[in-house]
Image (cartoon, grey):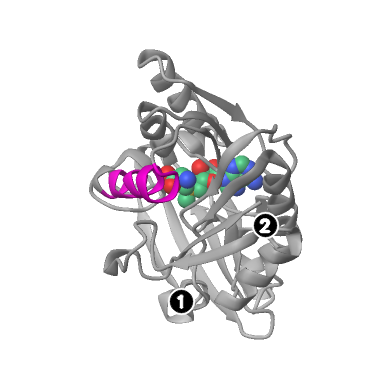
Amino acid sequence: MTSEMKLADLANQPRPPVPWEEGDNIPWHEPEFSERMLREHLNQSHDAASRRSIKIEEHVSWIHQGLLLKHPTRILDIGCGPGLYTSRLSKLGHECVGIDYSPASIAYARNQAQEEKLPCKYLLDDVRSVDYGTDFGLVMMIFGEFNSFSSTNAKTILKKAYRALHESGILLLEPHTFDGVRDTGKPGDSTWYWTRKGLFSNRPHIYLKEKFWDADRRTSTTRYFIIDTATSDMLKYAQSAQAYTNEEYRSLVTEIGFKDIHLYPSLTGKEDESQKGLLALTAQK
Ligand SMILES: C[S@@+](CC[C@H](N)C(=O)[O-])C[C@H]1O[C@@H](n2cnc3c(N)ncnc32)[C@H](O)[C@@H]1O
């Protein structure tokens, strides 16, 4: 959700915000934003949006060998972005479906699949409502996106993932650790700057970022105010994340019906200092 505001409204914001009430997420699904975000997904100088290729290859190798024991299967990637995991997994013999509501990411993924003749299909849709299909050997949702959904939506996604798996299919989640979510809401990381153009706008603007940790709800919320310096028009976006302890992750997936749950320190199955704040969870249908 985007809301148009006046400068005076800045003072009247509830602090802390009610999570998810001021906005669902950053505008991944808006065409122009998604074009700008795609550049960040593909940028090899940082690990925002998607990680660098070298790290993705380590993850893909663990998924293929460590988790799937090199047996070709059908894989569903929920929130697949530009298909950086699905395209690689398909080259290892898996048939992949990716779902994402970012138009630029899905266009990029489809184009790659077409150019390289990969067995990948991509759906431009919202993972909370779209039909996932059935008969997958692996359903994955990675890079912390799970926490960006309210607990109600997170449960809906897990139920849909459960239904999409064949008997004994595997769920792979890479959510944030409890501390990882708490750290994304450090008020001390609130910041601002002026820029000629950036992720949120192609026009000169002031970018204000305000962060909160709500200890009672155990949520972090980040608000972004984007102020166009030529027109003074102001947009607000908000993004929240739910924190769970490791035990809560176990109970959550058990409640849905999954069994044989394993937690790993990273998506390589091993400790990875560069991925602190995330963990990997696998479970079987
Ligand atoms: C942090 S990115 C990760 C992309 C990819 N999994 C990766 O690691 O390269 C999160 C992705 O989730 C997608 N996403 C977030 N909420 C979504 C929703 N409700 N429906 C579909 N896609 C969503 C975004 O568009 C974005 O591509």
Q: Amino acid at mark 2?
A: Gly
Q: Quadrant of residue 155?
A: bottom right
Neighbours of disc 1 within 10 Å: few (<14), some (14-19), many (20+)? some
Q: Secondary structure at mark 2?
A: loop
Residue 75 position within the rendered picture, expressed as x and y whole percent measured from the top left: 53, 36
Mark 2 C-beta closer than 8 Å to ligand 1: no
Residue at 47%, 71% in the rendered image: 184
Tell whether 47 sits left or right of 77. Answer: left
Residue 284 position within the rendered picture, expressed as x and y whole percent measured from the top left: 61, 54
Residue 183, disc: 1
Neighbours of disc 2 within 10 Å: few (<14), some (14-19), many (20+)? many
Residue at 55%, 75% in the rendered image: 246
Residue 23, disc: 2
Residue 89 position within the rendered picture, expressed as x and y whole percent measured from the top left: 40, 34
Asked if the magenta segment contains residue 63, the reply would be yes
Q: Is residue 199 visible?
A: no
Q: Is residue 225 above or below residue 211?
A: above
Residue 159 position within the rendered picture, expressed as x and y whole percent measured from the top left: 74, 51
Q: Amino acid at mark 1?
A: Asp
The secondary structure making up most of the magenta span is helix
* Mark in the foreground, 1 or 2: 1
Asked if the magenta segment contains residue 226, the reply would be no
Q: Which residues are magenta?
A: 55-69
